[in-house]
Image (spheres, helix red, strand yellow):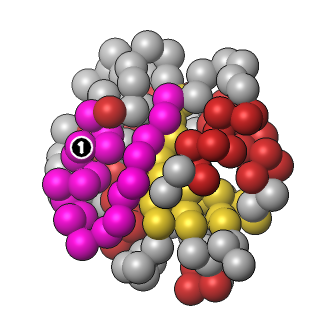
Amino acid sequence: MNKKLVVYFSATGRTERTAKSVAETLDADLCAIRPRKPYENRDLNFMDSKARSTLEMNNAASRPEIEEITARIKEYDTVIIGFPVWWYTAPRIINTFIESTDLKGKDIFLFATSGGSTVEKAQQDLKKSYPELNIIGAKTLNGIYDPGEISSWIQKR
């Protein structure tokens, strides 16, 4: 049996809504990546060079602390990781999750929400940073999408 987990980070709720929909479509379990220190609106002002998100994204070594992941990752064959695109790539908190979780041997898919960017650069960056992981593919999921498309995308593995 191919057991699936949708794990996601959402700063504003948009990615969370998408993650819930993806999990429902795939009959997958759902788990949030929660920052130890929640992001506030002022932290997400990408126009502010001193905003927390800007400082994190400008520092490739930044690894925001996360709450303990409650899902038992080892029980899953497929892990779908969702996140908003920040500065054309995955937020640094996704690196924190990946580096604190044993994802070796898992089929990994990525999805992202974005106001204007796509997920491709995030996929390239994560594959380059974690070549030992089986990152199969990625999709940008903004607004309405066809649930059948999601199912077939994950099944193609």
Residue 123 % position (x, y)? 32, 44
Left or right: 39 as drawn, with respect to 97: right
Q: Is residue 3 magenta?
A: no
Rendered residue at 82%/49% (across/down)? 24
Whether residue 111 is visible to the viewer of this picture, yes or no, is yes
Residue 137 % position (x, y)? 41, 46
Q: Is residue 125 magenta?
A: yes
Q: Name the kind of residue labelled 1 in the image.
A: Gln
Rendered residue at 57%/75% (across/down)? 77
Give the residue number, with chain letter if any, for mark 1.
124
Rendered residue at 63%/43% (across/down)? 152
| Residue lying at the far front of the rendered structure | 156
Residue 119 % position (x, y)? 39, 32
Rendered residue at 65%/33% (across/down)? 149
Q: Is residue 154 above or below residue 29?
A: above
Q: Nearer the viewer, residue 103 or 84?
A: 103
